[in-house]
Amino acid sequence: MRKIPVGIIGVGGYTALELIKILLSHPYFSLSYLGNSTGGVRASELYPALQGIVDMQVRTSEIEEIAKECELVFLALPHKSAMEFAKQLLSKGLKVIDLSADYRLELENYEANYCPHSDKDNLLNAVYGLPEFQSEKIAQTSLLANPGCYPTATLLALLPFVRYIEGSVFVDAKSGVSGAGKKLTDNTHYCKINENMFAYSPLNHRHQIEIEEKVKAFGGRELQVNFIPHLCPFTRGMLVSVYARVKGEFDESEVLKQAYSHSPFVRVLSSPSEVKNVVGTNFCDIFAKRRGEDLFISSAIDNLLRGASSQAVCNANIMYSLPQDCGIPKVAYVP
């Protein structure tokens, strides 16, 4: 099979580095273009970890040049910037995988939580890239909205049980500091986060509406999700705990096993999920335990991989009729 030329726009952050690392060893994708707003440097200057591995020039992102050299483009850009590039790239006949929030939500929810949307026509045709629930649509799309880390870990835990849940649910989510991005903030200073842990934006985080929207889309019912994210003093990884009241007779492990029997990247566990076991992989580890009418669900992912870059490559594989796990890391960094 021929090599498919791909590009990354928005080089400089953590997710772009993970994309580069995966694509360099991918058997069917060829990394042909790296771009950002300034250019003028080599990838190994931005990412010292790439020294001696890749010496590609990072260029100022130009639509015409990208269109000449790529068939597929990953956008590792902030929201608002991403939609401006996506609109132009799609008009040139390219396929686009957007890692920002610009195409994840319905218009009303997006504009209520982010900014006015400048690409409403393409928003209507974007596919939300959760492979376990959208593989057929992913295979047909040219514009994929790649889910972020919090919604990915939460939805994979929650969706198999939606039909049994009564009332609202609480989601306690804990993320490593890399989830906050590369730009320094007050919360990510060493003196603030070291030996510390705290909640932020409880019950009004903008991923809350995304989770509720997708529960309705994929689970077939409206559900109030009370989402509380926490920042934790480790670099990468995410642990999500879901608490719900349920009705009906079911075996929680069997529900998960049936839901994910054909998924190469969801592991149903017999003990609670641990972050260390998924860091460096695309796996989502899920555990569930029921006590009467109360249900606890635990899921763990690598926020930079399953929550961003490796999931994006899985979606690209599906878009090109390749096995979902093609070129995807499967062994955790930490034993």
Image (tube, rainbow, N blue to C red):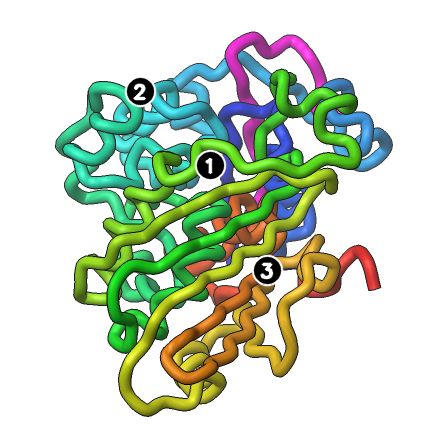
SS of the residue under disc 2: helix
Q: Tell me the SS state at disc 3.
A: strand
Identify the residue at image location x=72%, y=24%: 192
Indicate which label's residue lies in the foreground, 2 or 3.
Answer: 3
Location of residue 297 in the rendering, given as x and y in whole percent from the top left corner: 49, 69
Residue at left 34%, top 71%?
245
Residue 297 as seen in the image, left or right of residue 80: right
Q: Callout 1: few (<14), some (14-19), or many (20+) C-alpha neighbours within 10 Å?
A: many
Taking the image as shown, residue 215 lies to the left or right of residue 257, namely left
Toward the viewer: 194 or 131?
194
Residue interval drawn in magenta: 28-44
Amino acid type indicated by mark 2: Glu
Report the disc number at residue 8.
Answer: none
Q: Quick check: 229 above or below 254?
A: above
Residue to which mark 1 is pinned:
74
The answer to which quarter of the image holds residue 260 is bottom left
Res 210 → quadrant = top left
Cα–Cα span, label 2 and label 3: 33 Å
* Residue closer to the observer: 112 or 198: 198
Under mark 3, the amino acid is: Ala
Say left or right for 304 vs 75: right
Answer with mark 3 or mark 1, whichever residue precedes in sequence.
1
Amino acid marked by disc 1: Phe
Secondary element type, mark 1:
strand
Report whether residue 200 is seen.
Answer: yes
Q: Earlier in the sequence, mark 1 or mark 2?
A: 1
x%, y% of residue 163? 25, 75
Q: Nearer the viewer, mark 3 or mark 1?
A: 3
- x and y, in percent, of residue 30 in the image: 58, 43
Q: Which residue is mark 2?
A: 84
> Which residue position holds label 3?
300
Residue sitting nearer the eye, 137 or 163 = 163
